[in-house]
C-alpha cells in the first residue's frame, strides 16, 4: 500500500526557509485522482492544512500561509516538497505529508510527521 | 473559512465505555466531514469520511453521524488502543480546516 515519509532538517533559523520532502512509496505520485498535501500541527494546537500539489503541477494553498509557501513535485523521484519562507518561532510544528483525494478531500494515508523547530 | 469546534477538549473514560465526541462547524459542510485518530509518533489515521463511512480496516466500533453543522464520532466500546486524540475535518470549502481535537484519556 502507499506509504509516505517526511524528511528534512529538524532545526531552522528564524527568517530562513524551511524545506521538507515527502517520499511516496508503494504507489506512483503520477495518479490523476490524488493531490499530495502538507499539514502541520503547532505545539498545543490543532491541525492546519498548508496546501497541496497535483502531479501536473497545479497547487492550492491555505490563504493564511500562501505568501510564504511553495509546494513542488518531482515525479522522477516520486517525491513532493514544501518550502516555507521567512519562518519564525510560530512555524515550529510537526509537519505531515498526506495523500488527498481529489474528488472528496479527505487525507489518507499520512506520513508519521517530522518535528521542525525554528530557533537560533 | 469554516471554523470547526470540537467538544469536549478532553474526555476521561475507562476501557469498555461508550464514547461520544462532538464536532461543530460555523456553517454547513453538507456531509463533507472526516475524522482522524492521532497517536504520538504515529501517522494520523483516517477513521471516517463522508460523515459516516468507515475507512478501510476501521473496526465497526467506530461510527460517525450528523449533518449540516453538527457531527458526532462514537466509539461503542473503548479499547485500550483507542486512547488517542481525535480530529474532525471539513472538506466542503477551501481551505480544508480541522477541529481543535478531543483527547480521549
Image (tube, coloured by chain):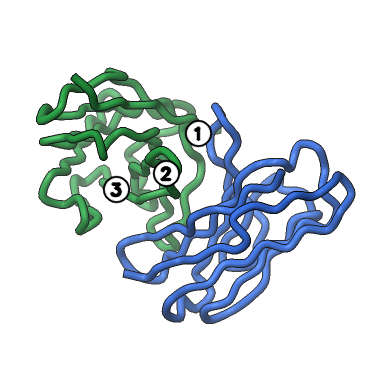
Q: Which residue is mark 1?
A: A2
Point out the tag, 2 or 3, that comes first from the N-terminus.
Answer: 3
Q: Residue at x 20, y 50 (%)?
A: A65
Q: Residue at x 57, y 50 (%)?
A: B36
Whole-number angstrom distance, CA of label 3 to CA of label 1: 21 Å
Q: Which residue is mark 2?
A: A99
On the picture, is A32 further left or further right than B86? left
> Please, what secondary structure does the residue beneath circle 3 have?
strand
Q: Quadrant of the C terminus of chain A?
A: top left
Whole-number angstrom distance, CA of label 2 to CA of label 3: 13 Å
Q: Which residue is mark 3?
A: A50
Pinpoint the chain carrying mark 2. A
Which chain is green in the picture?
A: A
Whole-number angstrom distance, CA of label 2 to CA of label 1: 9 Å
What is the residue that sits farthest to the right in this orientation? B16
Co-location on one chain, circles 2 and 3: yes
Residue B71: x and y in percent read: 60, 71
Amino acid at each position: 500500500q502507499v506509504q509516505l515519509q517526511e524528511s528534512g532538517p529538524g532545526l531552522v533559523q528564524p527568517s530562513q526557509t524551511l524545506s521538507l520532502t515527502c517520499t511516496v512509496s508503494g504507489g506512483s505520485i503520477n495518479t490523476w485522482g490524488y493531490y499530495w498535501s502538507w499539514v502541520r500541527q503547532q505545539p498545543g494546537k490543532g491541525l492546519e492544512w498548508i496546501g497541496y500539489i497535483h502531479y501536473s503541477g497545479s497547487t492550492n494553498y491555505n490563504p493564511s500561509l500562501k505568501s510564504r509557501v511553495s509546494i513542488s513535485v518531482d515525479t522522477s523521484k516520486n517525491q513532493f516538497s514544501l518550502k516555507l519562507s521567512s519562518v519564525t518561532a510560530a512555524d515550529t510544528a510537526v509537519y505531515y505529508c498526506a495523500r488527498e483525494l481529489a474528488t472528496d478531500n479527505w487525507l489518507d494515508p499520512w506520513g508519521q510527521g517530522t518535528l521542525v523547530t525554528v530557533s537560533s | 473559512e469554516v471554523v470547526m469546534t470540537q467538544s469536549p477538549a478532553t474526555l476521561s473514560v475507562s476501557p469498555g465505555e461508550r464514547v461520544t465526541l462532538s464536532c461543530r462547524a460555523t456553517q454547513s459542510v453538507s456531509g463533507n466531514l472526516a475524522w482522524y485518530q492521532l497517536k504520538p509518533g504515529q501517522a494520523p489515521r483516517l477513521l471516517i469520511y463522508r460523515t459516516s463511512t468507515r475507512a478501510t480496516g476501521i473496526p465497526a466500533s467506530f461510527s460517525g453521524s450528523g449533518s449540516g453543522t453538527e457531527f458526532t464520532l462514537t466509539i461503542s466500546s473503548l479499547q485500550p488502543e483507542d486512547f488517542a486524540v481525535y480530529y474532525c475535518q471539513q472538506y466542503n470549502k477551501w481551505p480544508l480546516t480541522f477541529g481543535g481535537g478531543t483527547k480521549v484519556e
